[in-house]
């Protein structure tokens, strides 16, 4: 039996994924050791390999088949736009992709003005403003703490994910428009889905079964 490799987005999503997998009898003891600097973890018995990667890299590993399966946020999937099967909404990591800014930026979105939009998600922002709103904007790519941009005058608004809303609130910003809902998704490489159909579909079926019992 060959190994099935699972790529997890580092951080909270990985922790949630591992507890979900445990519920369906898939474990990886090695991965629980937070001090470990190892990059790849193996469950010999179940013929599974796991690795942790930066969220944005997970779709890349899955598209190229370096990982058969990945778990990553829908925000990352939308931004990376890679080719693979999105098989399950895992129901955690819920948040919203939004346009946010100071309250007074509201008007700028309704009068089609040429504004600057700072974001970690340039493709999502481009698609929203150009294809959905038909508003020409200048998109500025940032790598984090995007809420800073309208405060220091880098941009009028931001496109970012909002979970609890406290980062916006504590910085005097508000949600101006909602783009879409986000949650963690399971994705599968297109070839792996055919070659390892039995094992992968069983995993999907078991997770679906567990999630439906949980939501009852
Ligand atoms: C995310 C996001 C917001 C914040 C939203 O950032 O980009 O900044 O969380 O969460 P909230 O609505 O619960 O306040 P993250 O913590 O990933 O850090 P980063 O901005 O450095 O990427």
Image (cartoon, rainbow, N blue to C red):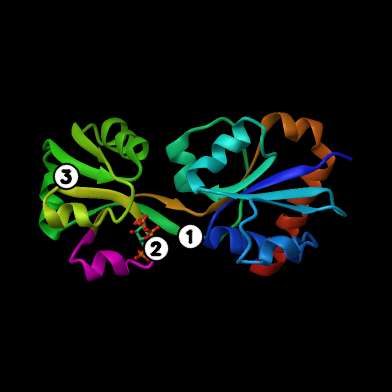
Q: Earlier in the sequence, mark 2 or mark 1?
A: 1
Q: Residues within 10 Å of mark 2 (few under 14, many from 20)?
A: some
At which x and y percent is residue 48? 78, 49
Does residue 209 sit above or below 67 in this rendering?
Answer: below
Residue denoted by label 3: 109
Residue 207 in the image: x percent, y percent?
A: 72, 56
Label 2 element class: loop
Q: How far apart are labels 2 and 1 at the CA level?
A: 7 Å
Which residue is labeled 2 in the image? Answer: 163
Query: How dense is the environment of label 1, judged by Cα within 10 Å: few (below 14), some, or many (20 and up)?
Result: some
Say which element carries label 1. loop
Across and down, in percent, residue 82 comes to 52, 32
Residue at 44 percent of width and 47 percent of height: 75
Residue 196 in magenta?
no
The answer to whether the residue bearing label 2 lies less than 8 angstroms from the nearest atom of ligand 1 is yes
Of residues 58 and 127, the one nearer the viewer is: 58
Q: Mark 1 near mark 3, Cβ–Cβ under 8 Å?
A: no
Q: Is the residue at mark 3 in contact range of ligand 1, meaning its CB lies under 8 Å from it?
A: no
Q: Quadrant of residue 130?
A: top left
| Residue plotted at (50% across, 48% down) | 55
**Residue at point 57%, 30% (across, down):** 83
Question: Quick check: 88 above or below 195?
Answer: below
Camera-side residue: 156 or 113? 156
Q: Nearer the viewer, mark 2 or mark 3?
A: 2
Task: Give the mark toward the camera: 1 or 3.
Answer: 1
The residue stretch that appears in magenta: 163-174
Q: Quadrant of residue 198?
A: top right
Per the image, the residue denoted by label 1 is 94
Residue 84 seen from this side? no
For label 3, count other residues whose C-alpha is less than 10 Å away and answer few (under 14), some (14-19) or many (20+).
Answer: some
């Amino acid at each position: 039996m060959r190994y099935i490799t699972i790529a997890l987005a580092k951080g909270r999503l990985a922790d949630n994924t591992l507890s979900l997998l445990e519920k369906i009898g898939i474990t990886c003891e090695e991965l629980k050791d937070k001090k470990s600097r190892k990059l790849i973890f193996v469950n010999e018995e179940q013929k599974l390999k796991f690795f942790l990667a930066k969220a944005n890299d997970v779709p890349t590993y899955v598209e190229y088949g370096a990982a058969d399966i990945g778990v990553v946020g829908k925000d990352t999937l939308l931004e990376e736009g890679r080719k693979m099967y999105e098989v399950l909404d895992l129901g955690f990591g819920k948040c919203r992709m939004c346009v946010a800014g100071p309250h007074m930026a509201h008007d700028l979105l309704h009068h089609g003005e040429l504004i600057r939009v700072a974001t970690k998600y340039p493709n999502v922002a481009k698609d929203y403003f150009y294809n959905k709103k038909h508003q020409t904007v200048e998109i500025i790519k940032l790598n984090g703490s995007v809420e800073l941009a309208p405060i220091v005058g880098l941009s009028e608004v931001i496109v970012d994910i909002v979970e609890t809303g406290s980062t916006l609130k504590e910085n005097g910003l508000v949600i101006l428009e909602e783009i879409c809902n986000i949650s963690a998704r399971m994705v599968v490489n297109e070839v792996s889905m055919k070659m390892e159909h039995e094992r992968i579909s069983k995993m999907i079926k078991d997770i679906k079964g567990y999630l439906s019992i949980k939501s009852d």
